[in-house]
Image (cartoon, helix red, strand yellow):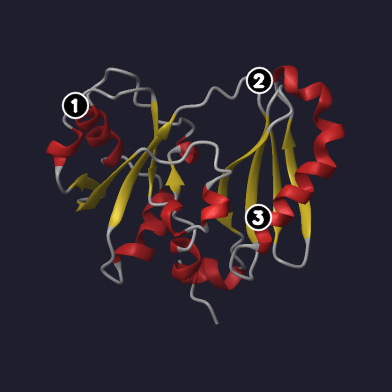
Amino acid sequence: MVHVYEKLRALEFDKLPKSIQGVYLAPPVISAPVEPDGNGFKLISPAELDRPAPEALVPKLGIKSWRDSGRLGVIYHGVNMRFMAGILLKQPTEPQRLAARAWLEPNLPLRLHLSPYVDFSEVSEVRYLADPNECHQISACHRGSSAASLSAALPQMESFAAKIASQLPPYKHIIDLGYFPSGDVWLIEINPGLNQQDLLVL
């Protein structure tokens, strides 16, 4: 049986198949190793990020963003990345702390990933629960000028999610897709579709 930690680690960007990396909306542009520090984390080599952000960036700790805290924790263009990363790492969310164990317990490198910020005000999102055998929509968020044509795009999006799931390990995943006013569809992120036993392990 696949351990829940393996399910989590398999979804870090550089572990995904190249074909899935190629349809990812905002791949990481900077990755920096971190280590535990009290109730949070700290950069192992802070000097790496001691410079202005080259563009607005969204951070993730391993595979988990700060979204559960009600904010994205955007590091804005020109702001010192070391300073902002230090603040964010001191305040991880509970899901981030739990997921981090998948790297820390087997003594594997845990990294802070910084990806380009994307304005989602005109981008609709649809989430699917999928494995190689089935795929179904679990939620949709209609936004801005993309909302009017979202319904017509859903068959194409479900097919896209199913194709992604077919290239992942053979258990359930939550696949989050973005639908743009242009009609383009991009992969926003993938999370493991954890079962009750997985959650008990965490």
Query: Dividing the picture into quarters, in which one does residue 131 lie?
Result: bottom right
Q: What percent of the width, then of the height, locates residue 197?
A: 57, 73
| Mark 2 and mark 1: Cα distance apart in space | 31 Å
Q: Residue at x 20, y 29 (%)?
A: 83
Q: Residue 122, which numbered label?
A: 2
Mark 1 crowd level (few <14, some 14–19, many ≥20, 10 Å Cα): few
Q: What percent of the width, then of the height, locates residue 6?
A: 46, 70
**Above or below for 63 versus 151:** below
Query: Dividing the picture into quarters, in which one does residue 73 lie?
Result: top left
Q: Earlier in the sequence, mark 2 or mark 3?
A: 2
Q: Pick the residue in front: 48 or 70.
A: 48
- Point out the residue furthest to the bottom here: 1
Q: Tell me whether circle 2 and circle 1 mark residues in contact (CB < 8 Å).
A: no
Q: What percent of the width, then of the height, locates residue 72?
A: 45, 31
Q: Residue 164, which numbered label?
A: 3
* Lateral position of residue 4 relative to residue 55, left or right: right
Which residue is the site of mark 1?
Answer: 51
Q: Amino acid at mark 2?
A: Glu
Q: Pick the residue in front: 70 or 16.
A: 16
* Lateral position of residue 134 relative to residue 29, left or right: right
Q: Residue at x 51, y 26 (%)?
A: 118
Q: Residue at x 40, y 41 (%)?
A: 28
Q: From the image, which quarter does the C terminus lie in?
A: bottom left
Q: Pick the residue in front: 123 or 39.
A: 123
